[in-house]
Image (cartoon, rainbow, N blue to C red):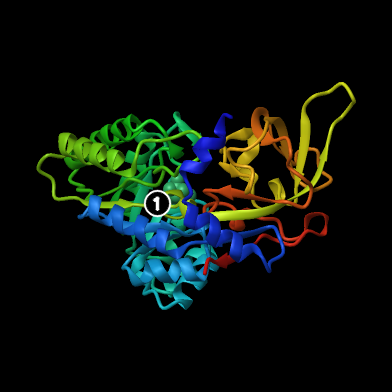
Amino acid sequence: MGNKSRAFELITEDEMIRIGRFAKDKQTPFLAIDLNKVGQRYDELAAQMPGAKIYFAVKANPLDEVLKLLADRGSCFDVASRYEIDQVLALGVPPERLSYGNTIKKERDIAYAYEKGIRLYSTDSLSDVQKIARVAPGSMLNFRLLLDGAGADWPLSKKFGAHPDMVYKLVKSAKKLGLDPYGVSFHVGSQQRDIGQWDNAIALVKYLFDALKEDGIRLRCINLGGGFPAQYLKPTLGMSTYTQSIIQYLKEDFPDDDLEIITEPGRSLVADSGIIVAEVVLISKKSDTNRTRWVYLDIGKFSGLIETSDEAIKYPFIFPGHEGRGEWSEAILAGPTCDSADILYEDYKYMVPNTLKEGEHVYILTTGAYTMSYSAISFNGFPPLQAYILK
Ligand SMILES: *Cc1c(COP(=O)(O)O)cnc(C)c1O
């Protein structure tokens, strides 16, 4: 029975009825977002880390309704492009609540952000620091540390951040160029399962703060990034275990400092709020003697489930009407497009009811993060993933 009961732990009877009703008059696949859950997650984090500012990573779920709800609660936003800047500002969020957190920026986009009033930027290279100094003079900088992403289901390793010695040099260059070195940022990797990774990162930050203090530069912010958990197939510790541990690490390394703390949650605020409803398109076998069924859905890697790459993120699946009934067996789950990469799970075998039929609905849980924002716009002509606010 494997994952079956785990998936069912993550949805209530009422939610099953609600999503079933909601799906009745809709084309699949679609994503339904329960805004109440997003609000709950935000409130939990805000209560657990009372001094910290929350910058929601817009890329995780850029639905206007989600951004608006968070904005109304006082959230700040981590934006990565001029398009995200435009979207968030258009919702009436003041520019002081935005951080341009992408370290990969065109100079004209930095100029654009500055013109719009954004004064907080993340950086990890000399060239980027110089660009910011030219077109966003005096701005505040968070310097991103390179981490290896160990322990994360979806690591962001290598691409972002600089070695601590490099960060040290960047801070000094920035100061010379008239910028305001504000703090150090890092990201331990998304869906990080090893809380100790924050301990390592904070120790590195401490080392940098101390080294710079000797040079008369006092950094005053630690940006703890994202990486906080959502509930997928494999259970994780709860959010409060993460925040309590992190607060402890901060106390140990910075006992007396009056620091500003930033968190940049993406996944942990929105993932659990989303359910994708998909339809079974085809069930087949590759030969008479092969026992494993292939179950093809109308959603795949290119319509929102790209985080199934390398089977990194294992979404919980619900087969409505089959729970607790009949025989189940292992199956390979795949998407509908004509690309051989469009297989969701092959090595990890999901248990699927033997009586599952083509045309039936499948619920894919914990899909509120990194789904609609990753969906291709017309691969094989399939439209991008439709998203609704669950009513
Ligand atoms: C994507 C991203 C986040 C969000 O990470 P999660 O693991 O989804 O919480 C935070 N900060 C930055 C800079 C990011 O790129």
Please provide percent x and percent y for residue 155.
Answer: 50, 36
Residue placed at 48% from the left, 62% from the top?
Answer: 34
| Quarter of the figure that contains the N terminus | top right
Residue placed at 57% from the left, 29% from the top?
Answer: 2
Please provide percent x and percent y for residue 372.
Answer: 61, 58
Q: Secondary structure at mark 1?
A: loop
- Residue 245: in sight, yes or no? yes
Report the residue marked by disc 1. 265
Q: Quadrant of residue 207?
A: top left
Residue placed at 40% from the left, 69% from the top?
Answer: 69
Residue 204 falls left or right of residue 103 = left
The kind of residue tagged 1 is Pro
Q: Quadrant of residue 21?
A: bottom right
Residue 51 falls left or right of residue 38 = left
- Residue 99: in sight, yes or no? no
Viewer-nearest residue: 76 or 309: 309
User: Hey, which residue is sitting farthest left in the picture?
Assistant: 256
Indicate if the residue with disc 1 has its beta carbon within 8 Å of ligand 1.
yes
Viewer-nearest residue: 56 or 113: 56
Residue 204 falls left or right of residue 19 = left
Depicted 244 relative to depicted 370: above or below: above
User: How many callouts does the rendering have?
Assistant: 1
Viewer-nearest residue: 336 or 319: 319
* Mark 1 burial class by Cα count in 10 Å: few <14, some 14-19, many 20+: many
Residue placed at 51% from the left, 72% from the top?
Answer: 86
Please provide percent x and percent y for residue 230.
Answer: 44, 44
User: Hey, which residue is sitting farthest top in the picture?
Assistant: 289
Depicted 141 relative to depicted 290: above or below: below
User: Hey, which residue is sitting farthest right in the picture?
Assistant: 288
Viewer-nearest residue: 331 or 72: 331
